[in-house]
Amino acid sequence: MKKILLIAAIIPFLTLHFSTLQAQGETLVDGVAAVVGKNIIKHSDIERPFAQMRLRGGMADAEANRCAILENLIINQLLVHKGEVDSVEVTDDEVAAYAEYYLENDLNQYGTREALRQATGFTYDELKQQYERMLRSMILAQRVQYDITGSVKVTPREVTEFFNAIPADSLPDMPDRYEISVIELTPTVTEAERDRVRNQLAELRERVIKGEKFSMLATLYSQDPGSAKKGGEVGFFGRGKMVAEFEAAAFALKPGEVSPIIESQLGFHILQLIERRGNTVNCRHILLIPQISSADLLAARMKLDSVATEIRAGHISFEDAARQYSTAANARQGGTAVAADGSTKLDRTSIDADYYSVGIPGMDEGQVSNATAIKNADGKDAYCIVRLNRKHPAHKANLTDDYDAIYNAALADAKQQKLRQWAKQQMAKTYIRLDDQYKNCVFHNLQ
């Protein structure tokens, strides 16, 4: 299951690494490093990321690095303090949902709660409290930062000035990038196959009703690899975090109750509620995914090969063919592929992740591929044909070829400047006290 959570990309993954100091045989005596408003920054808040930096090398000046970490933490706490003063809302439900997401990633990495405890030095509940404390501050700081910098814009002139200020020997190397268009064809699952899956799931549901363990059947039959190994358990989640059909079924159940068969974009499910905790629930589920027949896949391949032949012969444009035949979300846009940042220039990592078997790097500009098997955005079997529109070889960054990337860098820099200006002003009216060992820090962004 793709983890039907819809929040995975909202906050960068936390890397707390509570065991770093322990692994090095050191004991950290914690205490208050700084006070910002009514919030404190602990010595451990500095030492954990410092230990990470030391493991990665580049520790020429330990004092300067600790001061830089402290400066970032102070700016973050200024944002948190502002959010608290302005009563910016962060709900318990969203904090708990994020914490569960990260804890599930930890458990997937370490396997069991005991292994997680041995690796981090914290029990599951203690680690959850750590995550919740940090996440609440992070979400609050993010919202205040957006209020400060969300309206920042940069003009084309400012982008040019930003680029010209970069020394020639510091210009970044831009990797190979590709502009492509894609026609994707995902065969429709037959009604007979849908009936087969519904019937199988109905039999499993009946077995649970008659007394068999839901968790055992989930382990044996569920096609969600993430939860099947845990007896179908998905973990606690709040409203708005799962696809609608799954969420509605879960919140309608009583503990121990088994849902009717429901259908989502992933397939067919039955759910069993494990526990309701406040406005969150934890449930098990069994997912069965209707399969596309080999005959339907062959028909899709033959259809796309025929379409490719028509395009090469000039009988139809690629764009019109995409609008007519593609089942992908970008069909109306003529099949133009777009990266996560909105750019039409895809790097090799993106190309290989989605279209490795097509062999795009070896294609010529304007060439249309043969039909190739892929997994679509929902993980279903499909076929595609690809046209390489333009290849951008690796080069030093320049304004002509890399304007979008330079614009984004200039915008990020402008937002950082706005945040620094705000932080300096906030410093003057916020109570801040530093521990003696940090009194001599030189703060480059706050002074």
Image: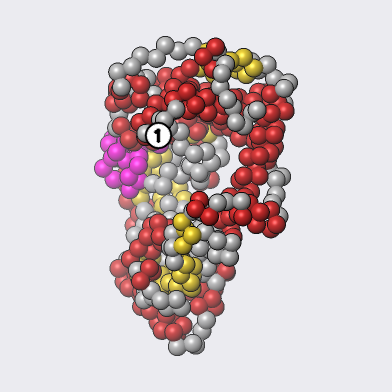
Q: Nearer the viewer, residue 114 or 19?
A: 19
Q: Is residue 2 visible?
A: yes
Q: Is residue 346 a member of the stretch shown in magenta?
A: no
- Secondary structure, mark 1, is loop
Q: Is residue 222 a member of the stretch shown in magenta?
A: yes
- Relative placement, left or right, of 341 versus 125 is right
Mark 1 is surrounded, within 10 Å at the Cα level, by few (under 14), some (14 to 19) or many (20 or more) other residues, namely: few
- Relative placement, left or right, of 58 versus 78 is left
Q: Please say if 378 is above or below 443.
A: below
Q: Residue 395: percent from the left, percent from the top?
A: 46, 62
Under mark 1, the amino acid is Gly
Q: Nearer the viewer, residue 419 or 266?
A: 419
Q: Residue 96: percent from the left, percent from the top?
A: 51, 28
Q: Nearer the viewer, residue 222 or 48?
A: 48
Q: Residue 322: percent from the left, percent from the top?
A: 51, 73
Display coloring? secondary structure
- Residue annotated with mark 1: 58
Q: Residue 403: percent from the left, percent from the top?
A: 59, 60
Q: Please say if 189 is above or below 125.
A: below
Give the residues drawn in magenta, as a range: 211-234
